[in-house]
Every structure is written in structure tokens, then in C-alpha cells.
Image (cartoon, coloured by chain):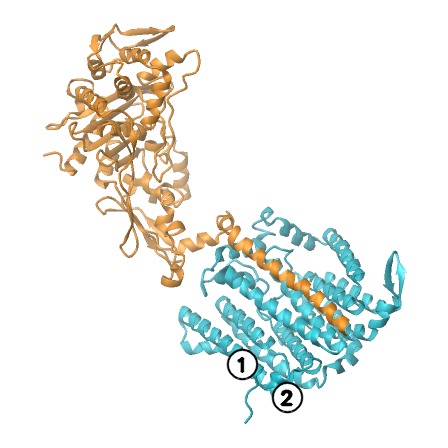
Chain colours: A orange, B cyan
Amino acid sequence: MRQLSRNIKRVAMVPLVGFALLCVYIAYWQVLRAPALRADEHNTRAQERLEKIRPGRILDADGEVLLDARQAADGSWERLYPASEAVAHLTGYNDSSGLQKGLRDALLNVGRYEHPLAEFIEGPTRGNDVTLTIDLDAQRLATRLLRRQRGALVALDAKTGAVLTMVSAPTYDPADVLASDFNYQLFQQNPNLPELNRALLGLYPPGSVLKIFTAAVCLDLDRVSPDTSFDCDGRYEIDGAEITCPRAHGSVTLEEALAVSCNTTFARLGRYMVPEEFLDYGRRFLLTEPAQLPLPSRSGRLGEFTGEDSDVLLAETAFGQGRAHLTPFAIARMTLAIASGGRVLEPYLVDEIIAPDGRVIAKSRTHEVGRAISAETAATVAGMMVRVVEDGTGKVAQIRGVDVAGKTGSAENPQGEAHSWFTAFAPAQSPQVVVTAVVENAGHGSEVAAPVVREVMVHLLERAGALY
Amino acid sequence: MRSIPHSRRSELILLLFAALVAALGGALICLGIGLELWRLTRAIAVVGAVIVAALMLDIADPRRDRWLLPIVAMISVLGFLLLWQLDSGAAARQLVWIVSGAGVMIAVYYLIEDVRDLSRLKYTSGLLALALVGLTLAFGVEKGGARLWLAVPGLISFQPTELVKIFMCIFLAGYVSDRAELLRDDTRPVAGFQMPRLRYIAPLVLMVVFSLAIFVGQRDLGAAVLFFGLFVAMTYLGTGRKSYALIAVVLFAIGAVGAYYGFTHVQTRVDMWLNPWLEPTDRGYQILQALFALAEGGLVGTGFATGGGAGIPAATTDLIFAVAAQQFGLIGAVGIVLLFALAAYRSFAIAWQSTDSFGALLAAGLAVVFSLQTLVIIGGVTKLIPLTGITLPFMSYGGTSVVVNFIAVALLLAVSRDCVPHDPRAEH
């Protein structure tokens, strides 16, 4: 009997060890592997849980609703787009596009916003509202101005770096896209790529707008002054390559060269610096950095100056051609750095995140990344840009009673007509807004992009109380 | 007036605690689905049935184990509360089964005057087991790919396999306790191992081969594993020789490999155990849904009565543990496993405290079946082992399962009454 008892104890050990093993294994799934399983593409539970949450709204700076939701008959939440095409690239058209993707956790109150005990305390959760720094009226205006064009416009608050306007054309009506499969197919197959947010994802040769960068680099390195004079006979030869101007500008100072956008002068500036310096300032201005916004964005490139043709390439890049490809957003951010006295501000789009009970749970602040150029250089470049608008290529952008600093660009590209660029800020003495626009294959910057920038700028200056 | 003995009081306190859980859980569900609050009595009735049974058992003889019934009540009420959320109709039927089960438990406890008498019924039990299996094979109705059900159409249907477990335990306990010496001592060497003579072991082997073949034929893999484990454990207990266990494990491995290549449904189970992501929407769907439910639960769970059954196949029966793990999280899941481990431990303890070899072997057999069944299904749900369809005792929905498990508890309590020496101090 005693032996039997002992044997029973031995047998009992097997399942009891099994139970212990089971506990360890359950912990493996419920804790260690849980995040991966929750994110598994075949796991519809998370999706079902999220569909029950009332999503937060997206509002513009004045509280205008950009994204709303309405409960459907089956209990899920249908998204509404009251501002429609004016903010389509911001709202996106479903939960995996636009800010609906980028701000998903905040809008649904999940992830790091989720209170671990929320479900015990208050039942099904409600998402947080998100207020953007965007001005819906400016969005509408820019959308109208860019109608039937391909291009983008970015406007920034020159004091804070807040994104005031971000428009990409052509745009689309999010409600319309998902109305039927046919509509969706049309949307996806449209050769003008309406889904593409050109402001952050469009890579364009910068053309002459990059001349303000080149000027800033050479001035900051103290290699030239605004009064340094150059001779333009319409063509400049370097290592067998020829760089031309539409006409011979004759003897010009650097300031005059920027005002008339003289290519040969800026190509010559390639001789005043080494590629490393040029690239180093590119990094300081965040020229090739993607945006730090909850939206997809691309890095740009200035080119690699390592080959035998590096001198030619630097000369070409110095006046905005070469192999440089930058986003409209990056040009706007560079312009912002000049407007704010050489300080580099990282633009932001989300102003506040507001909990369902009205508490502000996150508030954006101006984020200064560093300094690109001295305040002195920035002031000099700003003065030169004022000349561009006063009596140079950018006269179209003049606004009565305000000094506008700007630069036109006509970027040559293999697709046809030049891309029309304009980047500007105003008032020049105490900048309030920065506006940058590019219009694809539309010709000279002065003809197409500059008037668009001017109109948006007038609106934003009126809004800021800087225009009487 | 005699005071209530200490251990009786602690049993009652634990049972009342289970009743409190029932009341709170029932109240939450009633509020959640908009029922009148008094309907929470349904959940209390689950525990109430066990409390009434506990009191009635004591009228006959109060010397018995005091841990099993509170654990059973706790597991039953947790299962019932989950079931109520998943399928209120099934929950209502489950309540009927639990009350009936408690009644059957009382009846069995009273009918068995001395559990040792059961050893005389060992061959009857063995034959009944075979007959039930044979009947299922001949007239069984297929449900969900396995032929497990005997049915009188429109009247009643039940799963004979469940009852076979009890008969097999009685048969094996009786046979092994009678032949223990012969099995152990009258051996001769075969291929380096000391083997008992064939005529002593033949009935055992025959019995098991027969039932294994039939269960594989019925496609009831879980039961096959269960009976094989029971056979190995009982042989070891009878002989004390580990070599038999070792041989059995080798045989099992060979059998498993054979079954893998021989049966497509075995292949499915094993393939989807190794990698359910190969066919996430088809053959691997069930196990993946279970794992997703576990992950959704996380450390503290999604909360009681927050759903989770949707999408899980067999959520009310075999996979109920996955639903529990989602709602109660790791903390609750481990708690439930510990409840089962505690029940297994108590059953084994009754076995090793028994002074009678038949009683010890019967309790050990029932304990082995109970723990293996729990391990096989929870292990399957958590992908520790291949998933095979089998109920989680007292928790899964199912009339036969509930009633038969109550019979097993009645037998365990009878062993604790008749074969375990009682400390007289514990009674007062």
C-alpha cells in the first residue's frame, strides 16, 4: 500500500508539472506574443473593437470640422468629410490614409492614449478630437487657385512653424472615392495621381528658388557680399558644359543677379564653395529631410558630388538644376529658416489633442531644431528677396502696404514645360507667413505660382491682422 | 446541538464565496443585457445545487473530502457565466444539467454503500464500456466530424465516450488491484525488459487496443490520448515499473507517427499545430482565433462580459477557455488553470491517502482522466499541443460531460469516505 501511494504521488507529478508548463505558455501568448498577435493581419478582433469606438473629429484652427463620424445602422462609425476636397490630403479617405492613419491612436483613443482601465471605468471608449493648425478658408482658396493644375502649396506660420495651409492638386472628394468600386477604380487609375500629396511626396527640381539657398551658403561663409559683382554674357562654360541665361545680364551684383535670376552668376558661385560645404548647409536647412508630420513624406536629394563631373554638377545645382530633387514642403521649411532669422523650426500640423471630456491632453509647441545661418546672413538674404519682388522677377507678388520677400523658379524637367515655383514670406521686416507653391509644367514662376502664392498670402496676412 | 465541524464550515465558506462570485457575475450580465436583476439567481442556482448536494451528502456520512465541491462549484459557475454571455439558451440548458448532475452525484454517493464493492463490478464495467463504444460505432450520429453521439431522435442524445471513462476507471482499478502482485512479480525478460506474462496483461492490452482503435475510428483523438494515458498510468501503478511507461511512450510515438500519415484529420491537427499561419482562414482558423483571443485578453483581460466569443468556433464547448482568457486576461487564465490543478491535486491526494488499493487506483484513474482531459484541451487551445476536440470539465457546455463529471466526483468523494482514514479532530 505504501508503495502504491508513493507511485500515485509520482504519477501526480506529471500532470501537475503539465499545469505549471501550461501557465508559462499562456503567459507567453498573453504577454510576450500579444502585441504581434494583436497586429496580425488575420486578426479581425482588433478591427472589430476599433469599429465600435466613436472616432474623434479633426478640426481646423478655428474649430471648423474637417472629419466627423456618424453611427451606421450596424453600429460601426461612418466617416464624414464636411470640408471635402479642400482637405482631402489631410483627412485621407479611409482609416489607412492621411491623418486618419497618422493620428489613428489619438483619434481612436487607443495605443499610448488608451487608459489601461478605461473599459472597466467608462465602457466603450470615445476617441479624442484633434485640432490642426490649418486654416480651412486658406485651404479652400488654394484649392480653388490650383484647380485644373498639378501642384502643391504649403503655408507656414513664420513665428511658430505651424502649418497653415497644405494643398495638393488635383485633389478629390473622399466621400465620392468610396461611393462605388467604379469611382475607386477611376480614382486609383487617374494619371494625374489625385491621391498623391505632392506637398510632402512630390520631388521636383527646385529650379531658381534654390538660388536663395546658394546665396545664403556663400554669404554665410563670407565668400561674397550682396555687392560682389559678376559678369553675365549669357553663357558660362565649365569643364566643357555650358550654362546659359535667356539673355546676357551684363555686369550685375549678387543682389541684382538674384532679382533677375541670373543662372551664370549662381553657376559661378559653385566655384566659391566645396561640395561638402554645400551639402552641410543642405543638412542644416533640413533640405533633404522628410517632414516630421503625421503624414507620409519623402526625403529629397541635392545630388552626389563625388564623380569627375562634380564641378559641373555643383555649378548646375547652385542655380537649382543638376540632380537636385526636393519637396515643396522642404523649400517652405528652408524659406521659413530665412524668415525667422536663420533659426530652423520644424513645422507642426497638430495643435491640440482634446479628450472627450474636454481636457487638452497634448499641445504642440514651436520646435526649434537649430540654426542654419547667422541672423545677419538671414537678414541679408531676406533683403535680397525683397528686391526680387520689388523690381525683379517676382513683381507679380507685390502686396500693397507690405514688403514681400520672395523668389521665383522655373524648373526645367524632362516632362515638358518648366515647373513654376514661387516661395515667399511677408512682411519682410517681421515675417508672419511663409508661402511656397509649385505648379507642374506651367511655365515661369512669375506667371503661375507667384499669383497663387500672393492670393493665399493676402488671405493669411488679413487673418493674422498684418494687413490693413 | 452539535456545532458544525471545522472542515465542514470551511467548505461552506468556500461555497458561499463561489455563490458571491455567481451573484456579482450574474448581476453584471443582467445589467449588461438589460435583464431584471432577480435573474442573477440563475447563476446562484449553479452554486446552490452544489451547496444543497454538499449538505445532503453530509446527512449520509460527513466524513469526506472538503475541497473538491467548492472547486467544482467555482469552475461550474465561471463556465456558466461565460456561457450565459455567449448563448443564453445553452446556459439555461447547462443549468438544468448542473442541477441534474448534482442530483446524480447525490444518488451515486448514496447508492454506493462501500466503494470497495465496486471492484466486484470490474468485468461488468469493462463490458459496458465496450458495449457503449460498440453501440456508438454502429449507431452513432456524426457531429462536427466525429462520431461520438448516441441518439434517440427527438428525445435524447449523449456522448457515450464520457461514460466510458468512468467504466474504464472502475475496470482498470479492479483488474490492476487484483493482479498487482502477478503483474509485478511474475515476469520474464523480453528483449532486456522484465515483462509480465502475456495472460495477465492480455485483457489490459486487448481492452486498450480495442478502445484506441475504436476511438481512432470515431475520429475522437482527444479521447484516444485520454485512454492511452489512463492505461499507461494504471499499468505503472500496478507494477511500479517505469519500463512499462517507457515502452508505452515509445508505442505512443510510433502510433502518433502512424496516425499522422494514416489519417488526414490527424495531419490537419498536427500541421495546424506546427504552423496555423499556413492556412489562416481555413484549417488554421480555429487555433488562430483562440490565440487572437488570448492576445486580446493580455495581462488583465478585456473585462468581464465584454464579449469575445464571436469568431471562435466551438466557443461554448471545447474552446471556452479562450473566451475566459480574453475576458479575464493572464491573471484570470492562470487562476482558472490553478483551480483545475487544485482539483487534480485533491483527487490524487484522495488516491494516495487511500488505505485500500482498489479505492486508491480508482481515485488515481479518475484523477488522471480529469487532469489529462484538462491539459489536452487547454494545451490545445494555447497551441502547446495539437488541438483536439474535448470538453473542459465543468466549464464547457454539454449535458453528458457535466453529468459524468459529477459522477466522477461522487466516486472520488466515496473513496475519500470509505478508504481514507479520518482524523477525528477534524470533525469537531
Q: Nearer the viewer, residue A230 or B271?
A: A230
Q: Nearer the viewer, residue A449 or B244?
A: B244
Residue A99 image offset from top left, x and y in percent: 35, 43
Q: Nearer the viewer, residue A456 or B104?
A: B104
Q: Is residue B32 left or right of residue B46?
A: left
**The C terminus of chain A appears in which quarter of the rendering?**
top left
Report helix, strand or loop for mark 1. helix
Disc number placed over residue B12 in the picture, else none: 1
Q: Amino acid at mark 2?
A: Ala
Do the residues marked 1 and 2 share a common chain? yes
Residue A283 seen in render: yes
Mark 1 burial class by Cα count in 10 Å: few <14, some 14-19, many 20+:
some
Residue B117 image offset from top left, x and y in percent: 76, 83
Q: Is residue A356 left or right of residue B62?
A: left
Taking the spot 70% from the left edge, 84% from the top edge, the residue there is B112
Taking the spot 47% from the left edge, 60% from the top edge, the residue there is B301
Q: Amino acid at mark 1?
A: Leu
Taking the spot 44% from the left edge, 52% from the top edge, the residue there is A47
User: What residue would you read off at disc 2?
Assistant: B60
Report helix, strand or loop for mark 2. helix
**Up-down relation of residue A401 to residue B101 (above or below):** above
Q: Nearer the viewer, residue B15 or B408?
A: B15
**How far is disc 1 from disc 2 in space, using C-alphas?**
17 Å
